[in-house]
Amino acid sequence: MNTATPNIFGTGEVDAKVKVFINNQQVGDEITISENGGWQIKLPKLGKDGEYNLSIKVTNVAGHEKTIDFKNTLILDSVIEVPTIALDSGSNTGLKNQDQHPELIKNPTTQTRKPRLVGTAEAGSKVSLYKDDDNMKGEPFAVIYADTAGKWEYNYPDALRDDQYSFVVTSEDKAKNTATSMYLRVKIDNETFIEAPKLTNDDGKWHTDKIIQHNHPSFYLRGELHQKVKIYLGKELLGTVVLDKRDKVYKLPKPLKDGTYTLRYEIEDLAGNTATSALKFTFDTVNNTPVELTTVEGAIETEGKKYVSDIEKGVMLTGTAERNSYITMQINGFTVTQNPGEKVGNNSGRDPTH
């Protein structure tokens, strides 16, 4: 029982007198059995939780007495242990981040879609589990019992979609005492993202050619907010930053030498999801490759000079220069064509003005 002042009921011979004793001490007044053969007495407050010996003495109208002992009949249990609920470590892929993010202890983030829930409750008590039911007005999704050590566990059977979920448990012991746990908020998360690095100032010939002339460039950093991002230049780890705002800008810690580089981002969120992206770019401040005119299509060379006899066809000039460079052709000081090199180290153009 869970009340310290229980009602005691009984039956017996009409008009007989009944005295009630708890631990050999009379409690309450002597009562008379009613004409329907029943009797009732409300006990005074018993005291602490525990076992109590109940006995009654009945004296009938003829004066005959009878004592009945009910040893250990009354067990007062007015307190129940408050249950707990947690995400099992085997289901918690974000466990390693709890030291730096203590909020994850009560509100874990995990990739596990079928989490294993564990907790404690009074030994042998009935444990009811609820999901997304803050007032516990609905039916529990599971009812189990705590073992003799006061532990319980439950494997959620259905795969949960990525979202935030709240779980809570209630426990009820044999005396009908009940208690409710704290809420457990679990975030199921199986995705993260990191966009490819992008130059904040692509100052090459074209703004999208990924060729720059300044040796200390900056890059946009865009991805899942509040997560850590490792930044590599080639195989060298430059550092780790927290993506604390959108369009975060990262500047290389040291100047570059002329060459082609690969900048790589690696992100890992609190649930353990990872993603990576990269950008290949070129830092170029010198053009020391000779520009050479190698052929003039359809020309006849005489005494070191080239002559074109058929002006209707135009003039095709072919030569070499720095790969992927932009070629401007001039004749007698006039620009006649501009074009990017069509092949590595091989640039050509047709003079429309002959």
Image: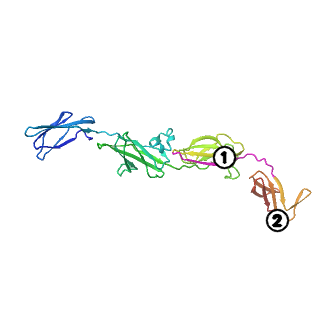
* Residue that numbered label 1 is attached to: 262
Residue at screen point 75% across, 46% down = 286
**Residue 298, quarter of the rendered image:** bottom right
Q: Which of 352 and 74 is in front in this view?
A: 74
Chain-order first, disc 2 or disc 1 = 1
Q: Position of residue 254 (x, y in %)?
A: 66, 39
Q: Nearer the viewer, mark 2 or mark 1?
A: 1
Compared with 23, 161 (above or below) is below
Q: Where is residue 264 in the image (x, y as percent from the top left)?
A: 63, 46
Residue at screen point 20% across, 42% down = 7
Q: Nearer the viewer, residue 56 or 199?
A: 56
Q: Position of residue 161 (x, y in %)?
A: 47, 52
Instruction: Residue type at mark 2: give it.
Output: Lys
* Residue that numbered label 2 is attached to: 313
Q: Is residue 330 left or right of residue 260?
A: right
Is residue 197 visible to the viewer in this orientation of the structure?
no
**Residue 312, quarter of the rendered image:** bottom right
Q: Is residue 130 left or right of residue 240?
A: left
The magenta span reads 271-291
Compared with 330, 86 (above or below) is above
Instruction: Residue type at mark 1: give it.
Output: Thr
Residue at screen point 84% across, 59% down = 296
Q: Is residue 194 left or right of residue 282?
A: left
* Mark 1, other Cα within 10 Å: few <14 / some 14–19 / many ≥20: some
* Mark 2, other Cα within 10 Å: few <14 / some 14–19 / many ≥20: some
Q: In this view, does 239 lie to the left or right of 288?
A: left
